[in-house]
Amino acid sequence: MILVVHAHPYPQHSRAGKALLAAVRGLPDVAVRDLYELYPDFYVDVAAEQAALAAAKTIVWQHPLYWYHAPALMVLWLEKVLTLDWAYGAHHALAGKRLLWVTTTGGPEEAYARNPNRPTLAQLAAPLKQTVDFCEMRWLPPLAVHRAGALTDDQLLTAAEGYRDRLVAELHHLAHAEGATRA
C-alpha cells in the first residue's frame, strides 16, 4: 500500500495540488491523508499517523515548496510523528519503507538548477532526505512540478498523469517485491 501524506494550507487555491491528488486518489492500494483537512487546529493525532505509516510500504510526502521548505503543518507532522524509539532510536518502525517526495514550485525548473545565489532542489531536499536516511527508509528520486501556478491545462494534465504513472509503477514494484518474498 502507498500512503500519500498531503500538506497544502490553501488547497482550494492550488490547481496543481488538486490535479495531482485527483490523479492518484482513485488508484487501488493508495490512501491519502490530507493534513490540513485532518488537523486544521494543528493537533496531530500521532497514534493515527503512526498506524497509517506502519501499514504502508511506500510513503509519499506531497506538498508545495514554501520559502524553500515544507508548509508549517508538514514540519510539525514530521516533528510529532517521527518520534524517538518509534521512527528511530531503539525501534525503527519505518525501516525499509520507500519514500517519494513530491513537490510543486512557483518558479521554473532553472530557478532550482546550479546557481551561486540559490540552492538547487537537491540541496533543498537534503533535510528531508536526511530524515528518511535517519529513519532507515529508502529515498526515491523526487518528483517536482515547476511553475505550478502558470502551467496550462494540458501541461498540468501531463504532470498529473506523470505522477499517477509514477505511483502505478511503484504499486507494480511493491507487488513484484511481495511476490518474490512469498516465493
Image: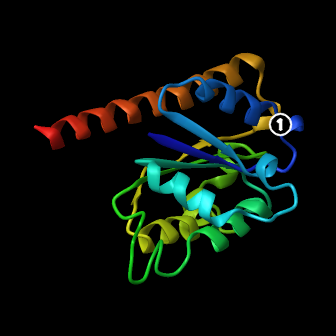
* 53 w.r.t. 124: above or below: above
Under tag 1, what secondary structure?
loop
Residue 53 placement (x, y as % from top left): 51, 55
Q: Residue at x 77, y 21 (%)?
A: 152
Left or right of 70? Residue 135 is left
Residue 67 in sight here: yes
Residue 176 placement (x, y as % from top left): 24, 33
Between 112 and 100, the one nearer to me in the picture: 100
Displayed quadrant of residue 41: bottom right
Displayed quadrant of residue 12: top right
The extreme left residue here reads: 183
Left or right of 158? Residue 175 is left
Left or right of 47? Residue 16 is right
* 118 w.r.t. 146: above or below: below
* 5 w.r.t. 164: above or below: below
Q: Residue at x 86, y 55 (%)?
A: 40
Judging from the image, the colouring scheme is: rainbow
Q: Residue at x 48, y 41 (%)?
A: 2
Residue 85 placement (x, y as % from top left): 46, 80
Q: Quadrant of the C terminus?
A: top left
Q: Quadrant of the N terminus?
A: top left
Residue 37 placement (x, y as % from top left): 80, 46
Between 31 and 59, the one nearer to me in the picture: 31
The extreme top residue here reads: 154
Q: Residues within 10 Å of mark 1 (few under 14, many from 20)?
A: some
Between 139 and 89, the one nearer to me in the picture: 89
Residue 114 in sight here: no
Displayed quadrant of residue 164: top right
Left or right of 152? Residue 167 is left
Type of the residue with mark 1: Ser
Q: Label 1 belongs to which residue? A: 14
